[in-house]
Image (spheres, rainbow, N blue to C red):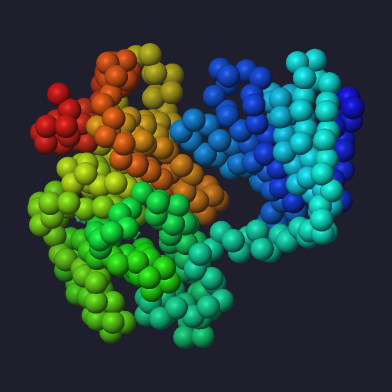
Amino acid sequence: MQFEELVEKLVHRMQEGTFIQGTISQPRYKSEGLQKVKLKPVEIKKEVHIQFEYHYERILKHENIKVADIQPALQQLLEQFKQMQAEFTDEKAHIQLTKKFKVSWKAEKATSTKTVDLSHNRKKNYLLDDATPYPFLIRLGVQSAEGKVKKQKYDKFRQINRFVEFIDDALVHLPKDRPVRILDFGSGKSYLTFALYHYLHIEKGLDIRVTGLDLKKEVIEECNVIAKDLGYDQLEFLVGDINDYNDETAVDMVVTLHACDVATDMALARAVKWGAEVILSVPCCQHELFSQVQSPALDVMLQHGLIKERFSALATDSIRAELLTLVGYDAQLLEFIDMEHTPKNILIRGFKTGKSPSAEAIGKYEAFRDLLNAKPFLERALKDAGYLS
Ligand SMILES: C[S@@+](CC[C@H](N)C(=O)[O-])C[C@H]1O[C@@H](n2cnc3c(N)ncnc32)[C@H](O)[C@@H]1O
């Protein structure tokens, strides 16, 4: 089979609706950094799209392309790889591309005909179902008494669901032989705190003890009343500043959702200090680096306020991930939620490895920091605590 025929065949199968999912792997050019791409059909605003999930070494990105316009993107992608596994309603294909783009297509017939279920694909993303009434979501005003998610709360519902998905993925890193200690810093109204308690304790039956911490006294009082009413006896809320919170010696998982500015850094520093196995943190507004960043080499970008703001935010999260790596975490920056729903769409994920950093990694970080003239809060906090020299 020729390369053009392969592209045509795949496009045809995607457009006729018999493509279930696929993975394109084995890059031809390692330098590109893209390791594999997963494809699946999804329905967005009543139109079928193919979702491309790009796997880089430490980053995951998504792109949805209308199935009607899929040809150029698919062709361009296949040109960069040597292998594809594709599942269709009637067969599974193992596709191999040679150096000279000759194609081998080996298919295995499906024992029974499978169906492409777009609604299932969508629903799978929601660990909390949007049609089931959950007492905590009703109390928090996200759902009506009948369990319908309120229109103005849908973004919040989507965010907590996505966060719970990340928590679910991290479960293998948490201890199984004792209660799991979890801290939610800057918990605010605590949609996430309640959701994770519900999911991990009520649905999964895990033995957990959860604390939400926030500066706002009234909000915390209200959260404690709700927790008590719901009988969530291993969930407590405390008033306090993250930076002064010293009540713990060991915590297994630290989460934050939109903790303002350097409050995220405070939480990351605490998590490192406690040796948390899992860190999941979606940062919020970032001001620290914006006021520091200065670099003649980047003037062309930084002269524009808007670019400077976005650049500072991205650089801040890159610095955070790098610092976590330097203190023994496998740190990744992942897409939290589609840009169309919130611009605050990066999640920092850290799994503890305890690995010491190489001199090269330290040098790379320092060069980046110095290029920007940055003096990151997190670096200072980690140095003060003796984790960095
Ligand atoms: C944007 S809200 C997010 C609340 C919640 N996590 C959510 O996503 O709904 C940020 C919260 O962080 C809290 N916060 C900011 N700095 C803090 C600090 N130093 N210590 C404790 N809480 C802090 C604020 O009071 C606020 O409730």
Q: Is residue 289 visible?
A: no
The image quarter containing residue 200 is bottom left
For the residue pair 324 and 108, the one nearer the viewer reads as 108
Q: Residue 273 in the image: x percent, y percent?
A: 17, 42
Q: Nearer the viewer, residue 23 or 157?
A: 23
Q: Quadrant of the N terminus?
A: top right
Q: Position of residue 281 (x, y in %)?
A: 34, 48
Q: Quadrant of ligand 1?
A: bottom left
Relative image position of residue 115 (x, y in whole percent)? 78, 60
Question: Residue drawn 59% across and 61% down?
Answer: 124
Residue 121 left/right relative to 106: left
Q: Nearer the viewer, residue 149 or 90?
A: 90
Q: Quadrant of the C terminus?
A: top left
- The percent position of residue 300, horizontal first and vertical second, equals 43, 19
Is residue 347 shown above or below 232? above
Q: Is residue 50 left or right of residue 34?
A: right
